[in-house]
Structure formats: structure tokens, C-alpha cells
Image (tube, rainbow, N blue to C red):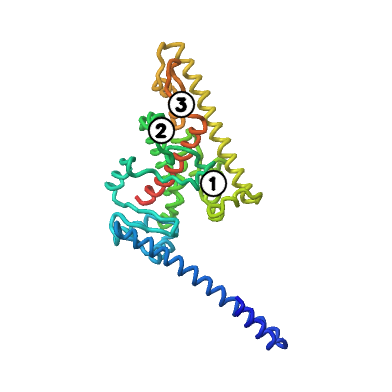
Amino acid sequence: MRTIRNAISFFTKQTNSFPSTRMLLLLVLSLSVVSLLGYLAWYSYEATHRFFNEQTQQFMPCVSLQENLILNIRATENKAFVHHKLSQKYGPVFHTSWLPIMRGVVVTDPTISKKVLLNTQKFLRATSAALDKHPTISRFLGKSVGNTEGELWSKQRRLMNPAFIDNNIFTVPFVRKCRQCINQMAESKNDKGEISVDVKDLMTRMTLDILGETVFGMELGYLSGQHSELLDAYNFLWNEGAFNIWTLLLPTVAKLPTAFNKKVAHSLDVLDRDIYGLINEKRRNLEKIRQELQKEHEQVTEAMILAKLEKKSLLDSMVLSNMKVNDDSNEPTMTDKELRDNTVILFIAGLFFCTAFYTFY
């Protein structure tokens, strides 16, 4: 730094009568310093990346940083295309990364994926103490079957199991929304009989409508161009608010009173308000049906209560499983917070995987 200052002082004295020349020299020197620092940072990054790859290559193929960057730039948001191309070159299991702290293993073989998912003792779910302490992510995702282990996971999974028994919860909305989607595609024909649509956007909107009915038991109307405050809040949190790069690197930034953080807080409030409202509404409705059935039957079962519902959803089944249908039941129950957290994770999982699946096929 002293050498740089001496150089600047020397050239400044020599060019006092030429201010434009002095500014040009300062600019050149500044760019040189920035370039040097950038090179050092990139070299350190490359060295770290190379070290991790050398350790990992003992067990599986590793994708180079340059190849990963190029493929992701070409594919924009289509991660399925990236993984398909990489699996053709490296096989069904390979290691990839963006940063030394953001690394993962990609499995493209369904048979291997099944073994990994079923072996919960050896392959634990990805949990992060840092994310759990993050003020936005911890409130957005909460504690659900997607990010917990042990007794807490077992209790929640056991209480959620009955919700997945009735296939009509999934098939009826799926068939209805697929027909609506096909009709929209047919209406978009031009004079030549050609159909031009944004498949990913259409599949995303169809998936949101299916999940609205399947998870929440409500009509979102996203295929028809409608918007709901709940859906807008979820989209903002998932795409921008919860996983903002600056708050991930510096969690304290999420606590600053900025306009962005205020929007994040408002979206979280909307999400909580609407989901807790749905939980309470469904609980009151299910309790009312139970009381009516008890007037006619000595023993009331969950199946009898669900049969009385006009529209069934996963949230209905989870709330019902969480209620003590029989007064002598000593089964543990989930709190409203746990119900809310599992509803959010089901919606996220359904949207993420179903959209990619429908778009691919």
C-alpha cells in the first residue's frame, strides 16, 4: 500500500498542470488494485474448490465449477436440464457445488433415490443450525416433517399418515384442473391452428390451483388469472424474501428496518394469519359435524366425519387426526404451530416437484 501511495504522489506532482491526466492515472491504478484483489479472491476460491473436489473424488465423480456455471447459465431456471446433461457424462450419482459452503450430491437414478430415502437411519435429513436461527427462514419453514428428526418427526409423521390414505383428495382436483389447463391451451390457437404457450408458467399456475384444493381445500383460481393475498405472500417469501442472499450471508441484515424487511414481515404475517385462520375454521366445521353424528351414532370415526365433507383436503385430514374424535383417546396431538408448519412444507414440496414433473412430461 505504501508503494501505491508513493506512486500516486509521484505522478500527482508530475501532472499538476494536467488534471485530466492525473484523474486517468488514478483510475488506472484503482482498476489495477481492484483487478489484483479480484484475482486473489478467485484464486483462493479455486484452490478451496479444488481441495474439496480432490477429497470427494475418492467416492464419486465431481463436476467442475466452470462446467456447472456454464450449464446453469444456459439453462436459466431449468435445473432438470442441467442434471440430465451432467448425469449423461458423470453417471447417476455425482457431486456438484456453487460455493465451497454450498455443496451437494445429485442422484438421478430412482432406485438409488428410493434406497436413500428409505434408509433414514444412515441418511439423515438436511438440517442446519444456522438456518434454524435465521429470523426469516425459521419462521417461514418452522419445524415440520421436512426438517426434523427423532421423536418430533415420528409424532408428526404418525399423525399425518391418515391424510394420505384417500386418493380422491389428489385425483379429483388433478383431473379437473388438467381439463381446465387443456381448454386454455386449446383456446390459445392462432389462425394457423398452432398453439403457443409458456409451458412452465401454465404448469406452475395449474399446480398452484391443484395444491390450493389438495392442501388447503380452497379455490385459488390462479389458472383463471385470479390472485390471493396468501399466494402472493407465499410467492414473495419463496422467490425473494426468505432466501435473500444478503440475509443468508448476514442474518442480522434481516432485522434492519428496511422497506424490503418490512415487506418480508408483512408477508409472514399474511401467511400465518390465513393458515391459522383456515386451521381454526376447519376445526370448527369438523367439530360441528362430529357433534351432529354423535346424536345419531354411539361411536363416531374419522372416516364418518370425512364422508360428510363436501371438499376434502390434507389440512382437513390433519386437523381431524389431531382432534380427539373419541373423548377417551389418549393419543398425542400436534399444536397449531406444527399443523401450520407441515401445511407450508407440503405446499412447497408439492409445488417444487410437481411443477418440474408436469413440465417435463
Residue that protrudes farthest toward the right in the picture: 17
Label 3 sits on residue: 333
Identify the residue at horizontal 35%, vertical 53% (top origin): 106
Compared with residue 155, is residue 11 higher up or lower down, i.e. above or below?
below
The three-letter code of the residue at mark 1 reads: His
Label 2 sits on residue: 151
Q: Earlier in the sequence, mark 2 or mark 1?
A: 1
Residue 331, horizontal then vertical, whole percent: 42, 22
Label 1 sits on residue: 134
Compared with residue 331, is residue 260 higher up or lower down, i.e. above or below?
below
Q: CA distance from mark 2 to mark 1?
A: 23 Å
Q: Earlier in the sequence, mark 3 or mark 1?
A: 1
> Residue 169 is drawn in which quadrant?
top left
Identify the residue at horizontal 50%, vertical 20% (top origin): 287
Q: Secondary structure at mark 2?
A: helix
Query: Depth check: 190 or 228 in front?
Result: 228
Q: Relative to 282, is 115 on the left or the right?
A: left
Q: Is disc 3 surrounded by few (<14), some (14 to 19) or many (20+) residues within 10 Å?
A: some
| 3 vs 1, front mark | 1
